[in-house]
Amino acid sequence: EPVEASIHEAFDLVFSPQDPAAGGGVAAEVAFDTDEPPEPLAGATIDLGAIAAEFFLLGIDPYPRKAGAVFEAPSPPEDPSSHPFAALAALKKGKSDGDT
């Protein structure tokens, strides 16, 4: 069943032109007050669609829930011998009984 959700993501990116003297890396003399290094600016344009898609995908809730939905753990089976591997255990037991 579809679940409605809204995504509100704020992001701040810093771009720096590439330094051709350093082999295409980011210019070393530029100082920024951020924890992460600036993104290298390749060419004269910035692909805003790719940036928006990246942060949109990071903002999606991986486990969406319907409003008011409550998680209920599955109840344990009444008969402990009726687990999914009971049939395999019976086959194994039958095979080992037939081998001896």
Image: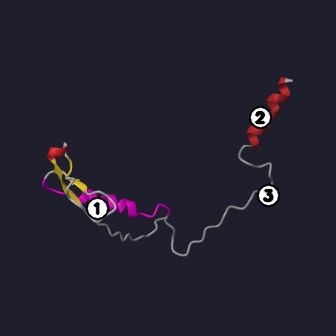
Secondary structure that dominates the magenta span: helix
Label 3 Cα crowd, 10 Å radius (few <14 / some 14-19 / many 20+):
few
Measure the alpha-carbon separation of dots 1 and 3.
50 Å
Please give the name of the residue rendered at 39% of the width and 71% of the height, measured from the top-left corner. 6
Q: Which mark lies nearer to you, 1 or 2?
A: 1
Mark 2 surroundings: few (<14), some (14-19) or many (≥20) residues within 10 A: few
Per the image, the residue denoted by label 1 is 52
Quadrant position of residue 76: bottom right
In primary-sequence order, the first of circles 1 and 2 is: 1
Label 1 environment density (alpha carbons within 10 Å; few <14, some 14–19, many ≥20):
few
Above or below — where is 16 with respect to 92? below
Count of numbered marks: 3
Q: Is residue 5 left or right of residue 42?
A: right
Pointer 2 residue = 91
In the orientation shown, which residue stands out farthest toward the left? 44
What's drawn in magenta, residue-wise?
A: 44-63
Q: Do the CB atoms of the residues marked 3 and 2 lie less than 8 Å apart?
A: no
Can you tell which mark lies on residue 78?
3
Quadrant placement of the C terminus: top right
Dot 1 or dot 3: first in sequence order is 1
98 vs 5, left or right, is right
